[in-house]
Amino acid sequence: MGGAPTGTAVWRLRSRGCWDDAAALLDALARSEPPAALLRAELLVERCMFTSEGWGQAEEALRAAESLSLDDEERGAAACERGYLAYAATLLRVRDRADEARAALGRAAALLAPDSPGRPLLDFRRGLMAQHIGGNPQAAEAAYRRAHNAALAGGDALLGSYTWRHLAALALDAGEVSEARHGFAESLRMREETGFLIGIAPALVALADAMTEPEAGRLMAEAGRLYRLLGGVPRWLADRLPGTP
């Protein structure tokens, strides 16, 4: 898919919230190569979650990827992205697409083999649906745990940072403060180590929720500075940070 230089450049742009620029690097390859088309769609879907904008472009990118000659693994990956896009639209109250999200994630589950490299991400996203749309934290925890174990075993630090944070949030809800602090701290560490700059402010806010003053205030202030530096992204973090529009 264009080799390491392109992949590195795409990651650097993505990690700073420059999703359009990252997607543009894949435009030519995405016309004929399914992996590039799927990655381009993933970038634009992620932008929707962080900015609540660009829904039409993400849909177009998904349709373009789906129009290529895909094998079952690639079709499963496309279905997983379609489910996540519908989940994001539902969660952010753009439009209720919960049924579409469930159907697409179910289709992905049918297409992806149990040992597929795409299965951990699918498990994580099914956990998101169970927790935030279905209101079933027990099912969410089981799905997060499967994704978490696979992410750590496979060296997927980005997914691991997400699973640490969501498992920690469930622990905090259950009153397990020490466990929550550990999970939030691990999530933050992974994001710092991988350079996922756009995801550090949410990780700081999550950790602050499990801390007492003055440490909680320090973490929130740091998150606010980073949030403003990155142009107010992710948008959904604004109501958590004092002094942000």
Image (spheres, helix red, strand yellow):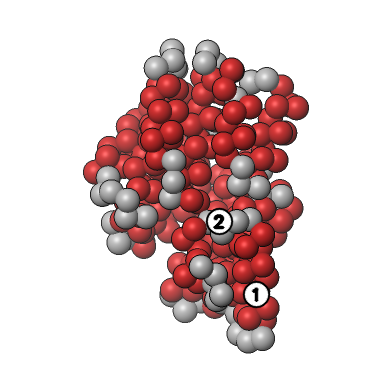
Q: Disc number at residue 221?
A: 1
* Amino acid on which disc 2 is placed: Val
In the image, farthest residue toward the bottom: 213
Count residues near mark 2 (Cα–Cα under 10 Å), then give few for <14, some for 14-19, many for 20+.
many
Badge 1 density bin: few <14, some 14–19, many ≥20, Cα 10 Å: some
At 35% from the left and 58% from the top, the residue drawn is: 132
**C-alpha distance separating marks 1 and 2:** 15 Å
The image position of residue 47, as x and y in percent, is: 50, 44
Q: Does label 1 or label 2 sit earlier along the sequence?
A: 1
Mark 2 — residue?
233
Give coordinates of residue 13: x percent, y percent: 66, 40
Considering depth in this image, is 175 or 41 the residue closer to the camera? 41
Label pair 1/2, CB-CB below 8 angstroms: no
Number of callouts: 2
Q: Is residue 98 left or right of residue 183?
A: left
Quadrant housing residue 189: bottom right
Q: Is residue 23 above or below residue 92?
A: above
